[in-house]
Amino acid sequence: MRYRIVEKEPFRVVGRKARLPLVHEGVNEAAAAHLASLDRRAIVTMKELAGQEPEGILSAVVYLTDSRDEGAEADYWIGVVTGPGAVADELDTLDVPAGTWAVFDNHGPYPSALQELWRDVFTQWFPSNPYTSRAGPELLRTQLVEIGAETDSQLWIPVERGGGAPGRGHRYLPPES
């Protein structure tokens, strides 16, 4: 599993948010519908605001509870990473504090390779490394492709050194606006 550890200053995700159920295998139809609902204006605005790593349009998952069970709800963002002060009137914003991220590179068929990567990070990588997951959104940058086609992607998981149970999800509550 290829990964690197990245320290990131505070940033903001600017995009569109929807509350969706988690799907562990196959296409998440609610996530696909959310992506399809984005209009051209929103996409152009997001691309204009993008400017930090991970670059480009991405998804962010904010867990509402510690549960990662199939069907549990999470806030699912389609957006871009910007500086902390970026804003666009027609888009939602999510402020993310500074922190450490484990960044995993992946290549394989969409979406199964990504779902397997997510599983392997929590069942294999965390137990064998000195990190635990911490509160924060999980970011995924990937190229949109047809179901089953090969794609490159990056999964960004918020982490901290030691303490707690390896790989436990933490609830992230965005700051009040």
Image: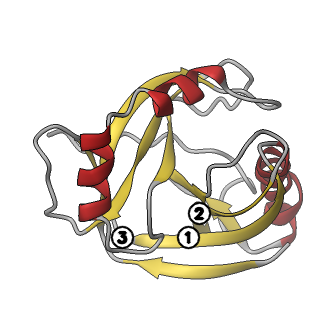
Could you say where residue 29 lies in the image, as x and y percent from the top left? 64, 21
Q: Residue at x 44, y 56 (%)?
A: 57
90 left or right, relative to 17: left
Residue 101: numbered disc: 1
75 left or right, relative to 116: left
Q: Residue at x 32, y 60 (%)?
A: 47
Residue 126: name its quadrant.
bottom right
> Mark 2 packing: few (<14 Cα in 10 Å), some, or many (20+)?
many
Residue 174 in view, yes or no: no
Q: Is residue 85 above or below residue 8?
A: above
- Quadrant where the image shows the N terminus: bottom right
Residue reaching furthest left?
89
Residue 98: numbered disc: 3
Mark 2, mark 3: which one is toward the viewer? 2
Q: Which residue lies under the disc numbered 2?
A: 156
The reply to whether discs 1 and 2 touch (Cβ–Cβ < 8 Å) is yes
Give the Cα distance between marks 1 and 2: 6 Å
Q: Give 51 or 174, whichever is nearer the viewer.
A: 51
Could you say where residue 125 lies in the image, as x and y percent from the top left? 83, 65
